[in-house]
Amino acid sequence: MSWHTSHDPGRAGLPLHRWPSEYVALWEAAKVRSISPFRKNGGGPRRSSAVVLKSEKGLRRLFGFALRSGTLHKASTPQELLSPELLDEYFAHLLECGNADWSIVGRFRELEFAFRLMYPGRDFGWLTRPDGIPLSAVLPMRTKPRFVPSSAVLLEWAEELFQWGIRKADRQIRWAQVRDALIIGILATRGPRLRALSSLQLGKHMIREPTGWLLDQDASLTKTSIDLILPLSSEVGTMADRYISVERPEMLRGSTSDAFWISWQYGRPLKATSISGLIWRRTLDRFGAGFGPHRFRASLTTTLAMENPSASLDASRLCGHSPEISLRDYNRAKAIRAANRHADALRALRAEIEQLAELAFAGRI
């Protein structure tokens, strides 16, 4: 049995082509169903392609678990797949796998949304509110502590990686390091979401002007459906110039592509999953704690709030998210500053006590 979404067979999802045929047909139809402003023509709930993809991953996880538990078969019905017994086992499985509380709630939200798309008009709200109680009330909703380096540290890392890369004799190592340095630099200074980053096209979203590079995330790429046009910093622009003039053409091996990011192994456009994976591996190697591209957004907004508390909403304009998110990161930055002040005070007090002890030992007091 070949699994699709995980190196751990016990956690793997089931690829779409191996789903029961009824679900394959329903899901394919749900993905292309037209949407009108008033939900006519079977439009169903509003959704973006990113939300649909996320929900599909949720279905893959459930179907993979159901197959391993012996519940899934060619004629499986929603009543069988969404039975209380199987859902209880799936809930326990997610806990056992170490998923965060918020992630578990998210898995069931994905299922609710997916089944609403496949079976419009039917109520699946109970998937996230069993017996009328939200899953978030069942779980403690703990937030795992996260390592969030500052944007300055991340940009410095990108510059180091870039400088090391251009000196490499092995061209494949150079390709990977220069490209990855540019990805890290853009994430550190502008914080695009993964979907937008992976969808960038040269000349359309990454534009070279006489004054430097522009990152143009049009409404089709952003989660909030707004245009975000941001100039790249001079440091990152230098990396982009080198990547476009040297590494990218070499990686294409004579072919052409509109995609900005190219796979050095195959000379084809780099997928979002590949970008996420390379960032995880790079951060794990650098910091000893791997994290994905989205962590760079938290780093950027927190760093902005710490450096300039009076401009805490600048992050909402830079990252294209709601002011509430910026205020949350501003509060996080205030907590970090308070913790740093407390640590400084403790160090000063400790130094004072040690000095008094030395004077007492010398008989001076």
Image (cartoon, grey):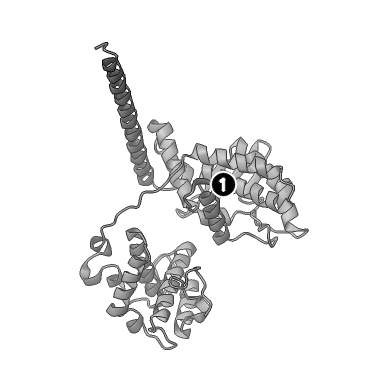
User: Residue at point 28% right, 57% down?
Assistant: 141
Q: Amino acid at mark 1?
A: Ile
Q: Residue furthest bottom?
A: 75
Q: Decide if residue 102 is in sight here.
A: yes
Q: Decide if residue 220 is in sight here.
A: no
Q: Residue furthest front?
A: 362
User: Residue at point 41% right, 65% down?
Assistant: 46
Side of 139 relative to 30 (left or right): left
Picture layout, residue 59 above or below residue 329: below
Q: Residue furthest top?
A: 364
**Structural crowding at the residue carrying mark 1, measured as other residues with C-alpha within 10 Å and reported as few (<14), some (14–19) or many (≥20):** many
User: Residue at point 40% right, 74% down?
Assistant: 62
Residue 42 percent across, percent down from the top left:
41, 75
Counting labels gives 1
Q: Residue furthest right?
A: 254
Residue 43 percent across, percent down from the top left:
42, 71
Q: Nearer the viewer, residue 293 or 173?
A: 173
Side of 73 relative to 156 (left or right): left
Q: Nearer the viewer, residue 265 or 133?
A: 265
Mark 1: which secondary structure?
A: helix
Q: Quadrant of the C terminus?
A: top left
Q: Quadrant of residue 232?
A: top right
Q: Which residue is mark 1?
A: 184
Residue 229 percent across, percent down from the top left:
55, 44
Side of 330 relative to 21 (left or right): left
Picture layout, residue 275 above or below residue 85: above
Q: Nearer the viewer, residue 8 or 83?
A: 8
Residue 338 percent across, percent down from the top left:
32, 33
